[in-house]
Amino acid sequence: MKRWLGVLAIALLLCGCSNAAPQSNEDSETLPLPQLPEFITPALYDPQNPIESLTEGAVKAYLPENGECTYIAPVGKNIALFAGDHITLLRGERLTEVATAQIPDLPEPDSGMLQIGEDGIAYYDAQGSRIIFLNQFFREVGTFSLPEEIAGSVYIAPDWKMLYYCSGAGVHALDLDTGVSRLLKAQDADWLGIRGGFLNGNVLRCAIAQDDGTESTILLSAETGTVLAEGDYLAGLRGNGDCFYLQVEDDHVFGVLDEQTRNLQPAGTGELYPLPDGRGAVQLTALEAGSRLDYYDMDTGSRTASQELPGITKLDDVFWANDMVWFTSGETLYRWETAMSPVEDARTYFVPHFHDADPDEDGMAAIGQQLEKLEERFGVEFLYWDEVAGIAPWDYSFTAECLTEPYAANLYQLERVMTKFPEGFFRKVAQRTNSGKLNIALVRGIYGGVETEKYTPAPGMQFFANGDAYIALTLGEDLEGWFYHELGHLIDNRVLSTVNAYSQWSRLNPWDFKYDNDYIKNQDRTNTKYLEGERRHFVDFYSMSFAVEDRSRIFEYACMPGNEEVFASKYMQKKLKTVCDGIRQAFDLKDDGYIWEQYLQ
């Protein structure tokens, strides 16, 4: 079992911050609580819905007014139901209405601009630039005017003691008891607003503007303003209280303050819905006449409850209140009392979660053993994981892949592709190098500096370093095509240096054509007359950048399936035959039907 997910590991240092009990705002007006009659309006309970009898009482159905229910949350022992700009307080098993309020422009409950507690609700009124406090019956009991212009969204701490916001100066922390505001982080970026908080308000999720107009997510310490992590994937981070949830590819990572990070891998392939409290999750699995809900306890990793739902095939939203699962499907709100649907399942569904700061060393060792077998078979040298550090040429950088899944997903494909080449072919590619072996680096990312006019990022590249030949490939679904392309460059190098098969290459192009001899200019080309029909001379615009890219693109497409149309014109046939003849001469190949010759007519 692995420790904290890397993005929140530093946040554990903040655990020493005290969480004192909430205090009333000094400017608040205390109003007497209303005397509640026995019943105000009819309950939402729908006794006519057959789901209750079909589930032996474990699931009950409710019909919110106008069929709306965007969020529910506990307020003490009662339930707050949100529907647009309305909040309704409901009590009892029948969900009888106790109080209701209409609040224009009410923030979403999970936005961080609204906090719900046993004492009521605090929310941000953007139009009035103030915080409004409601008691547990939704009556206004106080306001707090904010001192200056605010940029974007804000975050109210769960205990209502602090407010965090952005302005032109940077990120601010405002004490709601004293009214004192301090600059938490100076304006070193275009801060767009606070998108929420985690770990009881100790960690802030902020949005900053990117140069391309998109947003990037940053985690800040709410105490010091220190940047804890940055990345687009953090936009999916969710949390409540001392818990957080983050989906990382196929991993469902749950964390609890001061406890180990846990990765849930539920049974089956149904959709998983993490509950807002972070302590559980439900999975919906389709059945022939409905679906099944399974409840997973995040404290133990066990499946503790299971319930079939006849006639229900989808969930719109899932909530947790008063120790029960609530969900909406269509215009109906359902309550599932998991204690009435127990299941005996001794299996634990927790599996280790590995990340860059804590990789699966045993798994990576197994990947290394697979690569050794491929090295012996094909006469190449593979570089992976931490072996790729420092091998990139000066104008590029490589990001190492530290997770086993991308390797496992690509090695079979790579072996299949390399099997298509003649025996000893890869040794001939690197015959004149120091080691006599082709080096193949498998990486997560390849990045080049914009000032060098290289593509950023790149899916693959080839280069020579210290007298040896290298191919670098990003692990992904396009690996096969880029393997052919980068190998085509090394093949081209051997042909040019050993035979004169390409000496008349320029004559294969139209009389009015010139290569850009630049990797940027060809992106501005729009005339497709040499890319279509009988006049086709090139695979694509990229082929028009350099003659070497033209030939490598031809080799790439010639090796891939489904490209008959690309080589249908007489001009593309001449180019393909020239490439194929050059390879045969340079590599002394005598057999028939190599993979790159499949489209020769």
Image (cartoon, rainbow, N blue to C red):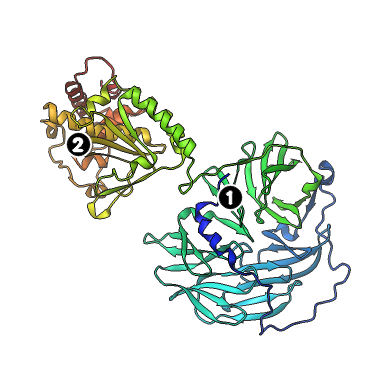
Q: Are marks 2 and 1 in contact (CB under 8 Å)?
A: no
Relative to residue 208, is residue 2 drawn left or right? right
Q: Mark on residue 142?
A: none
- Up-down: is 327 above or below 308? below
Q: Splitting the image into 4 quarters, where does residue 95 fall?
A: bottom right
The foreground one among 173 and 359 is 359
- Give the percent coordinates (x, y) of residue 240: 63, 59
Residue 88 in picture, x, y percent from top left:
74, 66
Residue that carries the numbered disc 1 in the rendered image? 261
Q: Residue furthest top?
A: 591
Position of residue 474 measured from the top left corner of the image (x, y, whole percent): 37, 40
Residue at 34% across, 33% down? 382
Tell me what residue is drawn at x 56 percent, y 80 percent.
146
Residue 223 seen in this snapshot: yes
490 vs 271, left or right, is left
Report the front residue among 75 and 201: 201
Quarter of the C terminus within the rendering = top left
Kindly identify the residue that appears in the image at 43 percent across and 35 percent down: 407
Q: Earlier in the sequence, mark 2 or mark 1?
A: 1
Q: Is residue 397 above or below residue 362?
A: below
Residue at figure coordinates x 79%, y 51% from the top left: 61
Residue named by callout 2:
467
Q: Amino acid at mark 2?
A: Gly
Q: Quadrant of the N terminus?
A: top right
As helix, strand or loop, the secondary structure at mark 1 comes to loop
For the residue marked with disc 1, what is the amino acid?
Thr
Crowdedness of circle 1 by 10 Å Cα count: few (<14), some, many (20+)? Answer: many
Residue 270: image quadrant is top right
